[in-house]
């Protein structure tokens, strides 16, 4: 063996000297294999090939979510498993009536038809929570955020800004939609918190929860224009609930790097964890990367209800820290984290929440 080895290694140096193909050592073979795998992975990311796989779809319609029913615990464990495995799932939810669904997307159309001069009036202290549009990186994208969207005051302020003569139809529709979708968010969070034994900690967060409703419009790409609607990202929210209207485009990345295209339907709501949820659950629930790709000429409307925690330090609950799960995140202020994300350092970081408050 030793002789063979010496011989082989000498032969290798000899061949090297002659620049002849050198048989690779196991180490080098493994390195090459890893490099090829990485290359394939990054090709997948940039080409963004889609898979036929589906996200878990969970029935959260009225009949299935009674805490006293036998189906509660099964539904609850399906929800938590989906969040731990994918960071998201498709909820089938019937509390938004077909009429309200039609009305909210009608209201979105009316809103985006306003002149840009009106839309830019919607500013916010928090980056990206006001009006975003005409951005060279994402020219197809336009979004308007309504802060405190589950309160009459929040929706009223927004409505008055965009329609100085009032628009009670918009105000009522946006308020009803936000309040009903917030119920879905709380239902999911109760299931998560019961599973982890952190209901009390959730209650104290709830008191500081603020909801942002973002209405989004993507125009179809023109010839020679890229079809990227929104770049791959994870949400900076605590939780997000996304709802699409008729035109597909939302794609979500699985942990093994495949992209899943999500079908729109009036009763489908994508429940998705944001970065803050990952920190709060001490890394148990990771936010998924997602993006929007526009395939046709038809414009696409979507809605997102995002939760944020205001004026309260978010701390990992004690029950989620043990030997197997050492503490991963320091207490942090959610809105300061968002400000950090928009700094040069935050934008460059591969995982902003980790660089901001990771241990
Ligand atoms: O338009 C969509 O479906 C997704 C929007 C989104 O990811 C976001 O606003 O963070
Ligand atoms: Fe997002």
Image (spheres, rainbow, N blue to C red):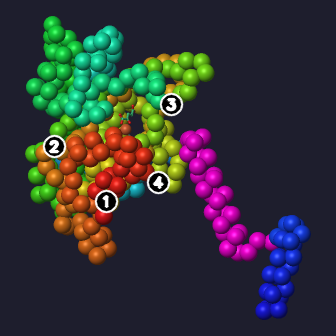
The answer to whether residue 99 is seen in the rendering is: no
Please state the horizontal and vertical placement of residue 358, each as a whole percent of the image: 31, 59
Disc 4 secondary structure class: loop
> Residue 163's image quarter?
top left
Mark 2 closeness class: few <14, some 14–19, many ≥20 residues within 10 Å = some
> According to the image, label 4 marks what residue?
255
The magenta span reads 23-51
CA distance separating discs 1 and 3: 31 Å
Placement of the N terminus among the 4 image quadrants: bottom right
Which residue, given by chain and number where applicable, does mark 2 sit on?
A: 310
Instruction: Tell me the CA gap for discs 3 and 4.
Output: 21 Å
Q: Are marks 3 and 2 in contact (CB under 8 Å)?
A: no
Question: Overall secondary structure of the magenta stretch?
Answer: helix
Q: Is residue 40 magenta?
A: yes
Residue 110's place in the image compared with 23, above or below, is above
What residue does disc 1 label? 358
**Rendering coords of residue 101 (x, y %):** 29, 24
Q: Looking at this view, is 276 or 340 the one in front?
A: 340
Q: Quadrant of the C terminus?
A: bottom left
């Amino acid at each position: 063996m030793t002789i063979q080895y010496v011989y082989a290694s000498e032969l290798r140096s000899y061949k090297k000297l002659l620049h002849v193909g050198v048989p690779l050592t196991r180490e080098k073979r493994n390195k090459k294999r890893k490099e090829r795998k990485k290359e394939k992975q990054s090709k997948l990311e940039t080409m963004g090939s889609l898979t036929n796989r589906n996200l878990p779809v969970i029935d959260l319609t009225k009949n299935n979510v009674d805490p006293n029913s036998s189906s509660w615990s099964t539904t609850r464990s399906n929800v938590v498993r989906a969040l731990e495995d994918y960071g998201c799932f498709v909820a089938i939810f019937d509390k938004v009536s077909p009429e309200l669904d039609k009305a909210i997307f009608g209201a979105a159309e009316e809103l985006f038809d306003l002149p840009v001069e009106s839309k830019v009036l919607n500013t916010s202290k928090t980056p990206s929570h006001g009006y975003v549009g005409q951005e060279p990186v994402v020219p197809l994208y336009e979004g308007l955020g309504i802060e405190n969207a589950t309160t009459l005051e929040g929706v009223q302020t927004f409505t008055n800004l965009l329609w100085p003569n009032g628009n009670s139809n918009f105000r009522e529709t946006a308020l009803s939609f936000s309040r009903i979708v917030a119920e879905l968010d709380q239902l999911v969070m109760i299931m998560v918190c019961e599973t982890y034994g952190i209901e009390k900690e959730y209650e104290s967060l709830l008191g500081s929860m603020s909801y942002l409703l973002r209405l989004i419009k993507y125009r179809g790409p023109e010839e020679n224009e890229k079809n990227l609607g929104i770049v791959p990202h994870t949400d900076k929210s605590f939780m997000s609930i996304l709802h699409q209207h008729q035109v597909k485009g939302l794609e979500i990345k699985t942990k093994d790097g495949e992209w899943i295209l999500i079908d729109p339907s009036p009763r489908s709501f994508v429940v998705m964890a944001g970065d803050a949820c990952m920190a709060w659950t001490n890394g148990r629930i990771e936010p998924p990367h997602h993006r929007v790709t526009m395939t046709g000429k038809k414009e696409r409307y979507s809605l997102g209800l995002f939760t944020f925690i205001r004026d309260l330090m978010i701390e990992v609950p004690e029950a989620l820290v043990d030997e197997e799960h050492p503490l991963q995140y320091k207490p942090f202020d959610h809105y300061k984290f968002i400000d950090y994300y928009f700094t040069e350092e935050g934008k460059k970081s591969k995982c902003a929440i980790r660089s901001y408050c990771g241990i």
